[in-house]
Image (tube, rainbow, N blue to C red):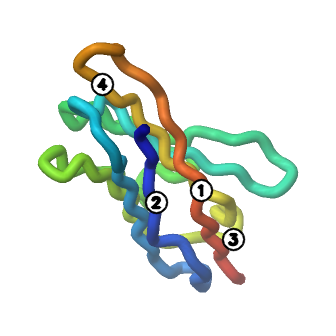
Amino acid sequence: QVQLVESGGGLVQAGGSLRLSCAPSGTFYSVNTMGWYRQAPGKERELVASISRWGDTNYVDTVQGRFTISRDNAKNTMYLQMNSLKPVDTAVYYCKANVNFLINGAMDYWGKGTLVTVSS
């Protein structure tokens, strides 16, 4: 059984920074694309940023230039460095990973979410 463990959320003032991390626990072969999603109160979940196994990245326009996604393949850990945070960034942030298994192919997993609150 694979679980995604997220950390790094919290309360920060506007203009501040936070770094989120996500790593899978359990037995698996490798990790393909990983991504961060967020869901604000009353809104649908949206993709914030994603990163392939080879380091190709993709960002939603609203965070471009402020957020940086990265990963350490040796640790199978993904990070989201969030700078110049704004109140509109307040949301629960979810980690998603496509995990490879030797026998059963690949499956998507979601973390439980970590709350990021940006005060004005």
Q: Residue furthest left?
A: 74
Earlier residue among tags 2 and 4: 2
Q: Which mark is residue 40?
A: none
The amino acid type, in three-letter code, at marker 1 is Gly
Residue at image mark 4: 100
Earlier residue among tags 3 and 2: 2
Bin the neighbour count of mark 1 within 10 Å (Cα to Cα): few under 14, some 14-19, many 20 and up. many
- 106 on left or right of 64: left
The amino acid type, in three-letter code, at marker 2 is Glu
Marks 1 and 2 close (CB-CB < 8 Å): yes
Work out how far the residue at label 3 is from the one at label 2, CA to CA, in angstroms.
21 Å
Q: Quadrant of the C terminus?
A: bottom right
Residue at image mark 2: 6
Q: Can residue 49 be seen in the rendering of this structure?
A: no
Q: Which mark is residue 113?
A: 1
Q: Can residue 95 be seen in the rendering of this structure?
A: yes
Give whichever of 104, 79 is nearer the camera: 104
Q: Quadrant of residue 53?
A: top left
What residue is shown at x 77% (from left), y 40% (from top)? 44
Residue at image mark 3: 87
SS type, badge 2: strand
Bin the neighbour count of mark 2 within 10 Å (Cα to Cα): few under 14, some 14-19, many 20 and up. many
- Closest to the camera, between mark 3 and mark 1, is 1
What residue is shown at x 45% (from left), y 74% (from top)? 18
SS type, badge 3: helix
What residue is shown at x 69% (from left), y 71% (from top)? 87
Give the image location of residue 52, x and y in percent.
29, 32
Q: Is residue 109 above or below residue 22?
A: above
The amino acid type, in three-letter code, at marker 4 is Asn
Q: Residue furthest right?
A: 42
